[in-house]
Amino acid sequence: MKKIELSKILLYSGLFLITLTMIIPIVNLLALSLTAPENAHKMTGLSLIPKGFSLINYQILLSNPLIVKSLFNSIFITVAGTLLNLLLTALAAYVLTRKKLVGRKFFMVILILIMVFEPGLIPEYLVVKDLGLLDSYLSLILYKAINVYYLFIMMRFFEDVPESILEAARIDGAGHLNIFFRIMLPLSKPALATLGLFYAVFHWNEFFRASIYLTDPGKWPLQLVLRQFVVERDNASLVGVQTLLEYKSVANLDFGSLQAGTIMLAIVPLLIMYPFILKFYAKGALEGGVKD
């Protein structure tokens, strides 16, 4: 019988407790959002089962055009921004890892300076204004199109690709574009998945710059609408005056449950995405790439 070490028991127990501190709040919010409004006052911070199952909160939220529009806005900004981030980051990493690149050290110094001395919000706003990007999706999609720290991670991945593979491709007549798209990117799926997750979470959770650059409520992402509701308690604009009057007398709406439902709408897409990304983490970038 295999001996179980005490250190492993303590480690796994600690990780399990940490996991619970993350899962319980999410499950509690889900249970609250699925609880009938008249029973919402019975829910506590540790309640994990709905008290009187009801979908009325989601029916109200998804019947509001502002919520539906903001959800699609967030999806569009996240998908477009993440694809652009990955493409530009990978292209920049490929170029900067070419040892024959003229001025390579100079570019590296510039990148480090950009990472350390990031420009302030006012210069950034003036640039966005001068480019005519105010009240435009591009103001959010183009922001930090390349994260320097993530760029270094991608460069490290590209540097691990054996030169023998690239040399074989050059002998077969492959140019830089062929090498980049047909060799470097396929071998770097774990890095692309990891950075794609980081970029997607950043875009999905962005609300601060959306509140500055977007003035049209029809272009607001979900996180900005969520802020209006949860932080500023703007119940009428979120639920809708007509819906508010209609359901107020019928179901005695509980705004705590509606807030929980709105939060769940904001975090569920990310939770769904995680399992599809995590499967790449354990894979080696060069598994089977070179045979000694």
Image (tube, rainbow, N blue to C red):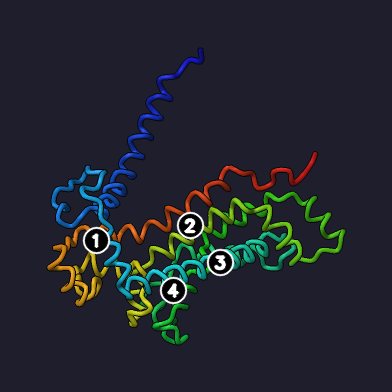
Dividing the picture into quadrants, the one containing residue 69 is bottom left
**Which is closer to the viewer, label 1 or label 3?**
1
3D distance between C-alphas at marks 1 and 2: 26 Å
The amino acid at mark 3 is Leu
Label located before the other in sequence (3 or 2)? 3
Dot in front, 4 or 3: 3
The label number, if any, that marks residue 83 in the structure image:
3
Q: Are marks 1 and 4 in contact (CB under 8 Å)?
A: no
Position in image of residue 278 (x %, y %): 52, 47
Q: Position of residue 19 (x, y in %)?
A: 36, 40
Q: Is residue 269 left or right of residue 99?
A: left
Alpha carbon of mark 1 to alpha carbon of mark 3: how far?
31 Å
The amino acid on which the numbered mark 2 sits, given as a three-letter code, is Phe
Which of disc 3 and disc 1 is earlier in sequence?
Answer: 3
- Please tell me which residue is depicted at 64% across the width and 63% down the height of the picture: 105
- As helix, strand or loop, the secondary structure at mark 4 comes to helix
The dot on residue 88 is none
Answer few, some or many: residues within 10 Å of disc 4's Cα (few below 14, many 20 plus, some between 14 and 19): many
Viewer-side residue, 212 vs 68: 68
- Whichever of labels 1 and 2 marks the residue nearer the N terminus, that label is 2
The earlier-in-sequence mark between 2 and 4 is 4
Q: Secondary structure at mark 2?
A: helix
Task: Give amino acid for label 4.
Answer: Leu
Viewer-side label of 3, 2: 3
Residue 140's tag is: 4
Rendering coords of residue 117 (x, y %): 44, 66
Above or below — where is 199 with respect to 8? below
Tag of residue 198:
2
Say whether disc 1 or disc 4 marks the residue closer to the N-terminus. 4
